[in-house]
Amino acid sequence: MPSAADLAAFRAFADALADAARAAILPHFRADVAITAKDGPRGGFDPVTAADHAAEQSIRRLIEERYPDHGIIGEEFGEKPARSPYRWVLDPIDGTRAFIAGLPLWGVLIGLTFENRPILGVIDQPYIGERFLGWTTAGARGATLTTAAGAAPLKTRACETLTNAIIATTDAKLFDGAEAGGFEQVRQTAKLARYGCDCYAYAMVALGGIDLVIESGLAPWDVAALVPVIEGAGGEVTDWRGRALTPDFFAQPNARAQIVAAGDPRPRDEALVALRRAAK
Amino acid sequence: MPSAADLAAFRAFADALADAARAAILPHFRADVAITAKDGPRGGFDPVTAADHAAEQSIRRLIEERYPDHGIIGEEFGEKPARSPYRWVLDPIDGTRAFIAGLPLWGVLIGLTFENRPILGVIDQPYIGERFLGWTTAGARGATLTTAAGAAPLKTRACETLTNAIIATTDAKLFDGAEAGGFEQVRQTAKLARYGCDCYAYAMVALGGIDLVIESGLAPWDVAALVPVIEGAGGEVTDWRGRALTPDFFAQPNARAQIVAAGDPRPRDEALVALRRAAK
C-alpha cells in the first residue's frame, strides 16, 4: 500500500492534473466546438468534444513525465499498461451532454487505483471552480471541497429512511426494463429525485446534499474517481446487490456496473430491496 | 411606455435587488436550513426555505423604499397592489428542489412588468455568480450575462430542425397525461433532453446552449423574469399553441400557463404540432 508520503504526493499531483484539465477545457465551454456523436455502450447520444481530447492528452502527458511506470486508462484514448501497481483512471469530461447544453454540471474525473482498488479521486468542476478530492487507503480516509474561498472537509449526511432521501440518476431513460422498474419503485418512495447531474450528483452525496445516486452501465473511468470522494466523506459505493466493487471491475476497460452511491447505508439498504431484482 | 432613462434606472435597480437577494440567500445554501413542505399547485414536493423568505422580504423592502407606487407580486408573500403601471414579479428561489439537494441550478427571478407586460427580467445564480439580465420595450431590446469576469451580450443560437435541438424540462413527471404524451413525442425527435434545471434552462436558451424549454403549470412569477431575458437574447416565449403570453396572465396570481421558450422558432414550430394537442 502507498505510504502517507506517497499519498500526499499523489494528492498534490492530482491537483496539478486537474489544473491542467481546467486549462484545456475551459476555453471550449460555451464556445462553438466541433461535436461528433459516437457509438457507445449506452447506445444514446454521447458527444466527444475537442475539450475532452485536449484534457485527456494533457493529463496523460503529465502522468507519463512524472510517473512513467504508472498505467493509464482513459475514456478517450484507451489503455497504457502499467509497470507498477498504480493506474490512473480518467474521464476528462463526464457529462458531455450537460457540457454541450452549457450546463455547468459536468466534471473532470481523475482516479488513481492501487492493485485496481481506487485510493484517490478528483471530481473537478472547472467553470464553477469546485474541486472535490477524496482518498481512502488502509491508513487514511478523507475528502475535501476546494473553491476560491478555500478548502473544507466533506461529510455525507445522515438519512434514516428512503422516504426522507433525495435521490439522483443521470437519465431514467438509460435503464433497461427491469432496471427502470426497480428505479421507479425507489423513486416513488424517495422524497424527491434529480436528473442529469452525471458525476456532480456523486459530489453532492459527498457534500451531504443528495442521499443516493442510482445508475447502471457505468465504466471503470466513470466510477474510479467517485469512490474515494464518496468513501472519504463517509459514504459507500456498491453494486445493485450491495456488494463492494471488485478490483476485477476496475481492471477491465469493457466492464460495466450498476452503481448505488450512498451517504448513509440505511436508505440504500431499503432501495436495494427493489434494485436487487434487476441486478446483473 | 418607459423612457430610455427609466429603463436604465430600472436595470440598475434590478441589479441592486439581485445583489440584496444574493446576500440573503447565500448563507443558507448548502447549510442546514429549516425546510417545510407546502402544498402548491404542482401538488408535489415544493419546499420553502428560510432563504426564500429572507430574499423576498429584502427585495420587497427595497422596492417599497424606492418605488412606493409600484405593485409587487411574489411567490412567498402575495400581492401588493400597484398605484402605477409598474409591477415587480418575484420568485426569490426558483428551483427549491435543486437548492435543497445542493445543486447550483436554482435562481433568483426578478421581473418588472409595465401594464402587465414583462419589460425587464433578471435570472440570478448567486453561488456560481452569474446574472442573466434582459429587457424588451418598444424601443430597446437586449440581454447580458454578467459574471466576475465582466458582462457579455447574450444571443440565442440558430437551430433549423427539432432533430438538432437540445430540449429541457424541469421534471417530465409534472405533466398530466396528454401533456406527457406531447412532450414525449417532442423528446423522441429532439437530439437530447435535459431535466431539473428550472429557470437555469431558460438562461441556457438565452445563452445559446439549449434550444427549447417546455413546461406547464407555471405561475406569473415563474415566467415574468424569463421573458425579457429570452426575448432580449433573440428568442421567443409562447404557450403550447404558439401564442404570446397575455397581460391577463401576468395580472393574475392564480393563473398557470403551458410554456415553450425557444431560441429559434423553427424547432419550436415543429414541437407545437405535438404540444398543441395537449394545449389548455
Image (cartoon, coloured by chain):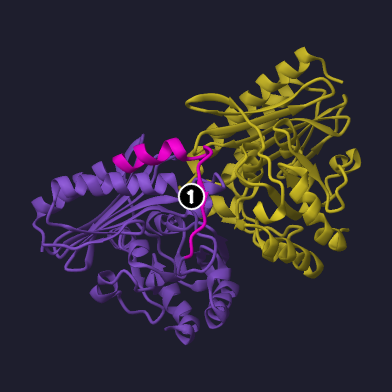
Chain colours: A yellow, B purple
Residue drawn at x 41%, y 44% as measured from the top left: B51
Amino acid type of disc 1?
A: Leu
* Residue A260 seen by the camera: no
Residue B134 drawn at (x, y percent)? 27, 55
Q: Position of residue A207 (x, y in %)?
A: 61, 37
Q: Residue at x 77, y 58 (%)?
A: A41
- Quadrant the N terminus of chain B occupies: bottom left
Is A134 on the left-hand or right-hand side of B91? right
Residue A264: percent from the left, percent from the top?
Answer: 73, 42
Residue at 86% x, 58% y: name it: A276
Return the chain for callout 1. Answer: B
Q: Is residue B30 visible?
A: yes
Residue B191, compared with residue A56, is above or below; it is below
Q: What percent of the width, then of the height, locates residue B271?
A: 47, 77
Quadrant of residue A50 within the rendered picture: top right
Task: Confirm whether the magenta stretch covers residue B168.
Answer: no
Residue range (magenta): B19-39
Q: SS for tag 1?
A: loop
Q: Is residue B187 above or below residue A45?
A: below
Q: Quarter holding the C terminus of chain B?
A: bottom left
- The image quadrant that residue B221 belongs to is bottom left
Q: Nearer the viewer, residue B198 or B144?
A: B198
Instruction: Say if the magenta span includes residue B20.
Output: yes
Q: Dot 1, crowdedness within 10 Å: few (<14), some or many (≥20)?
A: many
Residue under pointer 1: B105
